[in-house]
Image (spheres, rainbow, N blue to C red):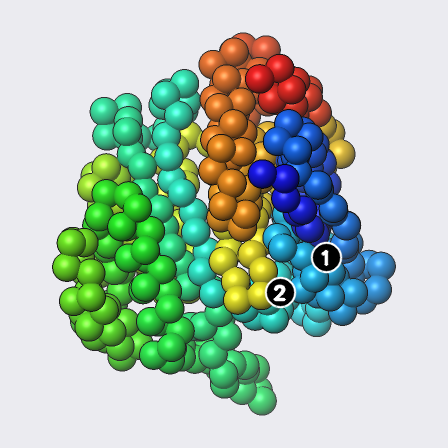
Amino acid sequence: MNQQLKIAVLAGDGIGPEITRQALEVTKAICKKFGHNLQYEEGITGAWAIDAVGDPYPKETHELCMRSDAVLFGAIGDPKYDNDPTAKVRPEQGLLRMRKSLGLYANIRPVTTFPSLLHKSPLRADLVAGADFICIRELTGGLYFGRPQGRSEDGNTAYDTCIYTREEIERIIHLAYKFAGQRKKKVTLIDKANILASSRLWREITQEIALQYPDIETEYMFVDNAAMRIIQWPKSFDVLVTENLFGDILTDEASVITGSLGMLPSASIGIHTSVFEPIHGSYPQAAGKNIANPLAAILSAALMFEYAFEMMEEGALIREAVEASLTEKIVTEDIAGKGKAYSTSKVGEWIVAYINKK
């Protein structure tokens, strides 16, 4: 069925423009193949936007996102801000403001292993082979947004506040059960309920909601135990759900076990629109060199078709093309090993050609 897709493209900083360009070319190829009408518009964000207009998430960019069905996002971050703790305006502030103003309440990271990359995993192949789980991280509450936050007048004391409301917790727990219902029917809540009052509220609400999903197994786990289990027994998980700070750390840990950070996409589900982005950072050392791995950005486009537009066949074809590129060893230097390394654009072109031939 022909459909109109309106997307915003925010390439961002570092390698963002290079990888996003490939994801956009793949998106165009899919739309052409399936007869969809693609409308896209580009906007600025991050360090690029600070340099241009003094704001990491300008009003014009926000308006563009609000009138789009989905946002294809690159990466944010620049060393000149990372290395200056006194900087008043930072690229990451734009990301936090975008999450809050678009109502992006849940970050979803699928953690899947690729057979051809098992040798790149820091874990033994028998531990990680077949691991397939989803991390769902709450994005708009917790320590990152709680107030008061700041420093004392003399600068010698700093404080942050972790706040969660029932509404924030309920909507993401329901989302976790929805995903589990489509998968292996198991939800693991990760918290620190033995110490933190906010975690006790998470656990209490999850226990209430679990009764509404009797066919789904519910597991409760402290965050320190979960950090170990992801390494020791990653295949034991199906859907993990947790608060903002724990999720930030655990999702990065989980992503490393697959063998390449450059392979993993993510989706941030929102009230107004949803954002699709690779989980890796802006990797400024590689910017402009045409060597960055575009596959996470391309797989983020696959998630966009599936989650924003419910186009499963389109998403599946992108995944098939990515798997084929790995099998044929058309890969960038981060996963090429001793084999030939291809450029960012060559990998993207190969995947587009594969889609066109199908």
Where disc 1 sits, the SS reads loop
**Label 1, label 2: how many angstroms apart (C-alpha)?**
10 Å
Position of 35 relative to 85 (above/below): above
Question: If the image is split into quadrants, where does the C terminus sit?
Answer: top right
Residue 42 in percent (x, y) is at 77, 50
Looking at the image, which is closer to me, 109 or 37? 37
Residue at image x 55%, y 42%? 305
Compared across the picture, whether 206 is left or right of 2 comes to left
Q: Position of residue 221 (x, y in %)?
A: 20, 58
Tell me where residue 45 sits by quadrant.
bottom right
Residue 262 visible, this angle: no
Residue at screen point 50% across, 75% down: 145
Residue occupying image coordinates x 68% and y 50%: 7
Between 312 and 161, the one nearer to me in the picture:
312
Q: Which circle marks residue 98 in the picture?
A: 2
Q: Amino acid at mark 2?
A: Met
In the rendered structure, find residue 161 and report the number of the disc placed on it.
Answer: none
Q: Residue furthest bottom?
A: 153
Q: How many marks?
A: 2
Q: Secondary structure at mark 2?
A: helix
Residue 306 in the image, given as x and y percentages of width and height: 49, 43
What residue did someone put label 1 on? 45
Q: Quadrant of the N terminus?
A: top right
Q: Type of residue at label 1?
A: Thr
Q: Are marks 1 and 2 in contact (CB under 8 Å)?
A: yes
Q: Is residue 35 visible?
A: yes
